Image (spheres, helix red, strand yellow):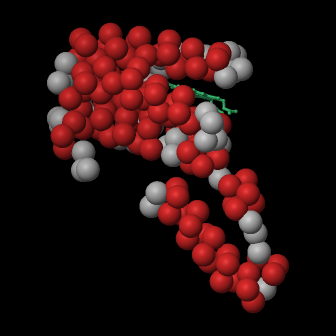
Amino acid sequence: MSTRRIVIALLVSLAVVGGAAPLYAADLNDVIGVLPKFAIPMREVGDRFQNMYFAAKGGNWGLAFYMSKYMNGAMNPAKVTKPNEYPLWQSFYEEKFAPVNKAMMAKDLAAFEKEYTAVIKECNVCHSAMGYGFIKVVKQKAPSDQGIDYKVPSKAEDVPK
Ligand code: HEC
């Protein structure tokens, strides 16, 4: 479900319940206030970004692209909770990150390694720009999640739309 749909569903149910019991009444700001901003989604961004590398290396390009897709999706709550800052993420993913996605599509490991390494710098440029220069992404020696086979042969197009 999209973030907007969840918010609307919550509001509708709150309106229904709120009519009978004001105890449950909450306005939109209360709902937005409990949705994730940047910090929680960024944990997922960090993990999926690390996993992506090992998937690409293992020839599991479907898994790599899947990680990229949901790395981006993880940031969706920020559309609602951080509307002024979300466009920074969006332009990062659509522009700076595009060559990484392109290399995954092409199953081109050399291009992937180059673009992946380059984009780490861009992650950190944004951290500094937003006042979080002390959060410096580095490449891990192992994936964040050990419970997946990074070597299943696959291609980016295998990821369901
Ligand atoms: C649009 C700017 C922006 C971009 C681009 C960005 N980040 Fe972040 N990131 C942030 C901000 C802001 C925080 C601090 C969260 C907060 O408190 O709001 C953060 C925090 C983090 C954290 C720490 C999360 C925690 O609380 O433990 C990690 C890990 C992280 N980012 C990884 C990445 C990776 C990997 C990339 C690149 C693929 C990236 N970020 C790109 C803005 C960005």
Quadrant of residue 67 in the image?
A: top left
In the displayed structure image, the side of residue 96 where residue 107 appears, left or right:
left
**Vertical placement of residue 153 versus 132, above or below:** below
In the displayed structure image, the side of residue 118 where residue 11 appears, left or right:
right
Residue 40 visible in rendering:
no
Question: Picture coordinates of residue 159 (x, y %)?
Answer: 24, 45
Quadrant of residue 99 in the image?
A: top left
Residue 127 visible in rendering:
yes
Which residue shows up at 63% across the image and 36% down it?
84
Which residue shows up at 36% across the image and 40% down it?
69
In front: 106, or 21?
A: 21
**Vertical placement of residue 108 versus 65, above or below:** above
In the displayed structure image, the side of residue 129 where residue 93 appears, left or right:
left
Question: Picture coordinates of residue 27 (x, y %)?
Answer: 74, 66
In front: 18, or 1?
A: 18
Residue found at the very far bottom of the displayed protein: 20
Which residue shows up at 23% across the image and 17% down it?
109
- Number of labels in the image equals 0
Question: Picture coordinates of residue 127 (x, y %)?
Answer: 62, 20
In the displayed structure image, the side of residue 36 where residue 100 appears, left or right:
left
Question: Picture coordinates of residue 160 (x, y %)?
Answer: 24, 50
Q: In the rendered image, which quarter contains the N terminus?
A: bottom left
Q: Quadrant of ligand 1?
A: top right
In front: 17, or 83?
A: 83
Residue found at the very far right of the displayed protein: 23
